[in-house]
């Protein structure tokens, strides 16, 4: 397949949807969640929290599939996801 | 003492040679006076008898030789007849029957290389025939009593590629009791055939006929399937190929996976499905095909959210039998095999390269393989997309097309378009289906009838190649413009779907294997067979065979036939537990070798090494090219069947009948191409300079600078080396080797003021008949114009030749 193709049934396939929750004040700016989110949902924000760090913000909420890696990887328990039903699939790469 | 009396001691040391000159049923005797040729050798000391015969290769001819050997105690035979490449094996077998070594036979080629090309000059041809017989006598006099070389071989085969070709070959070999390692890079065997809907011309369901074969492969105890695996490395030679395979992790244990599919439901990652050419989706964890063998799910690490660290892990959580195993790692598997069958298949032409057809941009332009998948799903009641009512097929996309660099025909596209058009028409007769073709190639069994049927069904076949496709930006329908060349009208029409009948091209896997095994490629890019007529599944690498589309585009019956053929060739080598090879291998004059080791790095097959301060040759690796000989300053390296002494003796004999103003040009011709080409020229009755003499060599890399200079010193007025061109040469390094030898010889000629133009090196392929003739004639012209070399430069040439060749500069 030399040409990039979008499958015909992409809109019919459903994948889990997640909602990201962030406790900004706990964040110590390590950046792991931003770096490791497989779908690029998070980016570093410009705002500061009280400790002086830049917590993540949700740049692409529609791409969160509730994998839970951010939750697992955050050393401060500052971020987690909850299931929010299903959504239309998308090709990641 | 009179010349016919010899003491018994001398008699026993003398060779007893029998010379036979064949009439060849008139082919030779119509031009060459065979009786005169036979009589001319009677005076020579070792010649016991010289006879003529109408057909030497017939049973009576052969029996004559056998009886003479017994009655006259002959121990050397010269047969002046056709080319040794033609009846050589026949006469070797004759000697074997008579109890002599097959290698004390020399043939003088007085048919293809004398009577036939020189048919207009009987007198000169007769003299040349006598000269050729003299050369054969000089060579046979020095023949060693050799035996065929025999090497042991086991029963293990590597089959690379698990498509229908690899499957068929594996089954044939497995059923015959051989050990098969089947390596396939995808997660399931089955190849392209697994993607097809129905096969022409019978419209069998492809998956239905393939599936039982795949199951048989899994069930066959002699076949070890390695799927999701690629060849990392292959080293070695026939009987001893060391293979390293990298098995990629599927992250699912196939023994535990029950194919329940629970993992798919929870997987959040989606990717285009390869089975459906990316037109449908799958999850990162998926079953490669409904008929996948091995039948187990596979986790595609590229589509997965990630395992380092484990981002999601939901498939593992939900897997009841615990088949998902994130701890799997790539494995390196090593094993040794005796023979290899390459069955790596093809790729379809990347239609995106034909920008005028808009593939990849227009949503309603697809390839034929896409349509196969659409038909498969539509037949199951799950249509992928609406196909529409007006469908056009465009033939020869990527084939017969200089613009994209492929001039060849891909063979199956006319038939698969005939098939797809019929399937689509029959599933909805209200459709308007057009096939825009260049030629309708329906060459096979049942093909023409199938094409007729398509026409009967109402498929419209238009002879014309559409130039351009244009998409309506609103409706997305595609407008096509083509000339109907049979009615001379322009057609401009709108279609719901345009199908590109893409051609077949070599794939990446093939490239990689070709590099590893040093396999040659044909001009069309596919792998090259050893001989297009008589060895269609062999390669020039011993023990490596080809099967299926890797060798060129073909349909399924031809692929299966080739796969069985390749298995048969492999079995032929392995079945006796040993195989024979002509003893044309290098050897060392141990008494002359000083252990300098300069030769070791010069062997292109790595057959040379040093042991106890003496050069040693691995006969299993030695290909007999003779490249090493030129690099020994002590002349300690030599080649069986073409020894240094024999080469010189032939040169001397070739020049011995030079009279007065005669010029003599010597042609060294390699076995594979040069000699064969000379035969072809003679067979075509094309004539060339009579003053030429052809000397057969396994490869012109055997012609050392020393030999070239000695030839000139002895009176050769011109030399030409004719060799297989680089791409088809069985000795991969010979062309650069020869160039370096020729350049060395020319350099020395320059040093003694002899025209460098007297030596030529030309690369050939066996069909360059005119090229051969022109080159020989040109050399002869040059030699005649330059005239004989005066005595003084010749003397300077002969002085200190060793010093000129090796003196001081040991790195040359």
Image (cartoon, coloured by chain):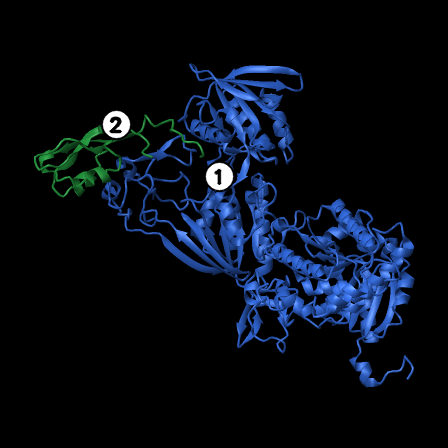
Chain colours: A green, B blue
Q: Chain of mark 2?
A: A
Which residue occupies 76% across, 45% down? B770
Q: How far across and down, in percent of the image, does residue B342 sit?
A: 53, 50
Mark 1 secondary-structure assignment: helix
| Tag count | 2
Q: Is residue B587 above or below residue B10?
A: above
Q: How far across and down, in percent of the image, does residue B421 sit?
A: 54, 25
Mark 2 secondary-structure assignment: strand
Which residue occupies 70% across, 67% down? B641
Q: Work out whether residue A68 can be spotted.
A: no
Q: Residue furthest left?
A: A50
Question: Does the residue at mark 2 contact the one at mark 1 (Cβ under 8 Å)?
Answer: no
Q: Residues within 10 Å of mark 2 (few under 14, many from 20)?
A: some
Q: Is residue B307 above or below residue B5?
A: above
In the image, which disc is placed on residue B192? Answer: 1
Quadrant placement of the N terminus of chain B: bottom right
Q: Work out whether residue B124 can be spotted.
A: yes
Q: How far across and down, in percent of the image, does residue B35 sit?
A: 91, 62
* Along the viewing direction, whichever of B121 and B628 lies nearer the viewer: B628
Q: Chain of mark 1?
A: B
* Along the viewing direction, whichever of B203 and B812 lies nearer the viewer: B812
Which residue occupies 14% across, 32% down? A21
Q: Quadrant of residue B691?
A: bottom right
Residue denoted by label 2: A87
Q: Is residue B138 above or below residue B187?
A: below
* Along the viewing direction, whichever of B182 and B423 lies nearer the viewer: B182
- Pointer 2 and pointer 1 on the same chain: no
Q: How far across and down, in percent of the image, does residue B498 sit?
A: 50, 23
- Horizontally, residue B665 falls left or right of residue B356, namely right
Quadrant placement of the C terminus of chain B: bottom right
Q: Residues within 10 Å of mark 1 (few under 14, many from 20)?
A: some
- Horizontally, residue B478 falls left or right of residue B92, namely left
């Amino acid at each position: 397949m030399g040409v990039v193709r979008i499958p015909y049934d992409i809109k019919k396939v459903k994948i889990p949807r997640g909602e990201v929750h962030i406790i900004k004040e706990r964040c110590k700016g390590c950046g792991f969640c931003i770096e490791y989110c497989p779908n690029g949902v998070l980016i570093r924000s410009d705002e500061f929290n009280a400790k002086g760090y830049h917590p993540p913000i949700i740049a692409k909420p529609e791409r969160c599939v509730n994998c839970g890696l951010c939750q697992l990887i955050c050393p401060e328990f500052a971020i987690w996801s909850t299931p929010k039903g299903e959504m239309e699939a998308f090709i990641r790469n | 003492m009179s010349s016919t009396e010899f003491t018994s001691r001398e008699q026993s040391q003398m060779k007893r040679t029998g010379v036979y000159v064949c009439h060849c049923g008139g082919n030779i005797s119509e031009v060459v006076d065979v009786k005169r040729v036979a009589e001319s050798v009677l005076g020579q000391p070792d010649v016991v008898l010289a006879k003529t015969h109408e057909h030497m290769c017939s049973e009576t001819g052969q029996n004559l030789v056998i009886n003479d050997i017994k009655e006259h105690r002959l121990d050397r035979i010269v047969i002046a007849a056709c080319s040794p490449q033609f009846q050589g094996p026949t006469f070797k077998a004759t000697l074997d029957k008579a109890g002599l070594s097959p290698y004390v036979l020399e043939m003088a080629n007085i048919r293809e290389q004398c009577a036939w090309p020189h048919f207009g000059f009987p007198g000169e041809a007769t003299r040349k025939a006598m000269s050729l017989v003299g050369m054969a006598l000089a060579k046979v006099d020095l023949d060693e009593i050799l035996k065929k070389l025999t090497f042991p071989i086991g029963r293990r085969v590597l089959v690379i590629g698990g498509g229908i070709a690899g499957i068929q070959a594996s089954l044939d070999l497995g059923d015959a009791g051989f050990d098969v390692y089947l390596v396939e890079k995808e997660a399931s065997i089955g190849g392209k055939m697994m993607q097809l809907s129905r096969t022409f011309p019978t419209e069998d369901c492809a998956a239905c006929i393939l599936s039982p074969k795949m199951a048989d492969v899994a069930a066959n105890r002699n076949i070890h399937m390695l799927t999701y695996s690629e060849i990392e490395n292959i080293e070695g030679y026939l009987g001893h190929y060391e293979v390293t395979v990298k098995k990629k992790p599927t992250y699912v244990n196939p023994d535990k996976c029950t194919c329940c599919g629970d993992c798919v439901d929870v997987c959040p990652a989606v990717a285009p499905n390869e089975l459906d050419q990316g037109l449908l989706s799958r999850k990162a964890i998926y079953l490669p095909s409904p008929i996948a063998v091995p039948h187990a799910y596979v986790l595609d690490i590229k589509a997965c959210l990630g395992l380092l660290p484990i981002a999601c892990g939901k498939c593992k959580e939900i897997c009841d039998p615990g088949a998902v195993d994130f701890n799997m790692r790539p494995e390196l598997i090593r094993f040794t095999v005796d023979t290899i069958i390459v069955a790596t298949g093809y790729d379809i032409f990347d239609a995106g390269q034909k920008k005028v057809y808009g593939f990849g941009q227009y949503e309603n332009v697809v390839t034929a393989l896409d349509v196969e998948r659409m038909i498969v799903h539509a037949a199951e009641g799950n249509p992928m997309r609406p196909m529409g009512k007006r469908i056009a097929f465009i033939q020869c996309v990527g084939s017969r097309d200089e613009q994209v660099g492929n001039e060849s025909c891909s063979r199956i596209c006319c038939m698969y378009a005939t098939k797809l058009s019929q399937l689509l028409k029959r599933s909805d007769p209200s459709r308007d289906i057009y096939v825009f073709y260049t030629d309708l190639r329906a060459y096979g069994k049942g093909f023409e009838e199938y094409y007729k049927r398509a026409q009967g069904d109402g498929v419209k076949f238009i002879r014309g190649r559409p130039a351009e496709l244009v998409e309506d930006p609103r409706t997305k329908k595609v407008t096509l413009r083509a000339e109907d060349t049979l009615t001379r009208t322009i057609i401009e029409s709108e279609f719901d779907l345009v199908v590109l009948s893409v051609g077949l091209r070599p794939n990446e896997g093939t490239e990689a294997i070709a590099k590893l095994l040093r396999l040659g490629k044909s001009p069309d890019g596919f792998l090259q067979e050893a001989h297009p007529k008589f060895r269609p599944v062999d390669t020039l690498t011993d023990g490596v065979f080809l099967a299926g589309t890797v060798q060129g585009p073909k349909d399924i019956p031809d692929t299966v036939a080739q796969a069985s053929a390749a298995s048969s060739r492999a079995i032929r080598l392995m079945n006796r537990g040993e195989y024979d090879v002509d003893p044309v291998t290098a050897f060392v004059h141990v008494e002359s070798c000083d252990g300098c080791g300069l030769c070791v790095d010069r062997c292109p097959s790595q057959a040379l090494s040093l042991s106890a301060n003496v050069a040693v040759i691995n006969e299993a690796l030695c290909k007999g090219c003779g490249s090493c000989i030129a690099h020994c300053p002590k002349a300690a390296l030599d080649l069986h069947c073409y020894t240094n002494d024999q080469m010189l003796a032939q040169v001397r004999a070739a020049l011995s009948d030079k009279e007065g103003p005669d010029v003599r040009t010597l042609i060294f011709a390699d076995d594979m191409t040069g000699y064969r080409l000379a035969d072809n020229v003679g067979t075509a009755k094309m004539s060339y300079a009579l003053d030429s003499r052809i000397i057969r060599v396994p490869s012109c890399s055997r012609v050392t600078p020393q030999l070239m200079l000695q030839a000139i010193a002895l009176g050769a007025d011109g030399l030409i080396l004719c060799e297989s061109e680089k791409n088809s040469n069985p000795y991969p390094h010979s062309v650069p080797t020869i160039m370096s030898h020729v350049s060395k010889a020319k350099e020395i000629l320059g040093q003694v003021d002899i025209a460098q133009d007297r030596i030529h090196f030309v690369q050939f392929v066996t069909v360059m008949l005119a090229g051969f003739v022109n080159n020989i004639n040109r050399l002869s012209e040059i030699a005649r114009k330059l005239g004989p070399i005066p005595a003084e430069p010749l003397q300077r040439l002969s002085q200190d030749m060793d010093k000129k060749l090796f003196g001081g500069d040991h790195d040359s």
